[in-house]
Amino acid sequence: MDWQALLLSVKLSSYTVLLLIPLAIIIGRGLAYYQFHGKSWLEALILVPLVLPPTVIGYYLLVGLGNQSFIGGLAEQLFGQQLVFNFSGLVIASIIVNIPFAVQPIQRAYEAIPIDIRDAAACCGMSRMRIFLKVELPMVWPGVLTALVLCFSHVLGEFGVVLMLGGNIAGETKTISIAIYDSVQAFDFDSAGMMSLVLLLFAVSALALTTSLSRRLGGLNATQR
């Protein structure tokens, strides 16, 4: 069992959800409530990581974040380190790859909020920020929870993009999925099986817990209405 790789994967997943979920709430809310020109194209762009092979996404990220790119060059000038083959680059890549897993559940949760509830809150004199914090967020919490668990689990098992952008640097970019691949390549099937079992058990447990909590919270919101 490669504990260093597991801890690095947990760290990467944690950073990703902490940065992505607030952004996904803003994007999901905007897509649910507003109509604008090009909305369908934006929604399609958000869903692209679901249909493109991870190696293709990894290639474009490698080119877009490399030293020869504007973003990669600027990051190296400002922070003195490159984004490719670096943990910070993996965080950026994980955020991009997991946007659909975060935005979709939250958008659907916002779309399920009846319009009259928001109108009633506004008629009671509540400000937009207060409506957002006191009315909307409690009602979309099941969607936020689902997005959080899906993103965390997906980052934990991500392989193609991590390998393309980060390579295989122990303690820096070698996640548990890379460690499993290395173990198989070395014919260490016991270690590969143990790490695979850990990911499988975590994924099943997390999804079961999310489903249960979402039903309870959904039932509670329905009762409060």
Image (cartoon, rainbow, N blue to C red):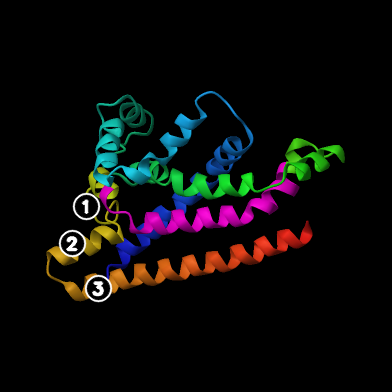
**Residue at 57% from the left image edge and 36% from the top image edge:** 31
Name which residue type carries label 3.
Gly
Identify the magenta region: 132-160
Element class at badge 2: helix
Outermost residue on the left side: it is 186
Q: Could you tell me residue 140's position as x and y percent?
A: 64, 51
1 or 2: tag closer to the N-terminus: 1
Please give the residue where the numbered disc 3 appears in the rendered image: 193
Please give the residue where the numbered disc 1 appears in the rendered image: 168
Please give the residue where the numbered disc 2 appears in the rendered image: 182
Closest to the observer, 190 or 26: 26
Q: Indicate whether 150 appears above or below 61.
A: below
Magenta span: predominant SS is: helix
> In the rendered image, which quarter contains the C terminus?
bottom right
Q: Indicate whether 172 appears above or below 122.
A: below
Image quadrant of residue 58? top left
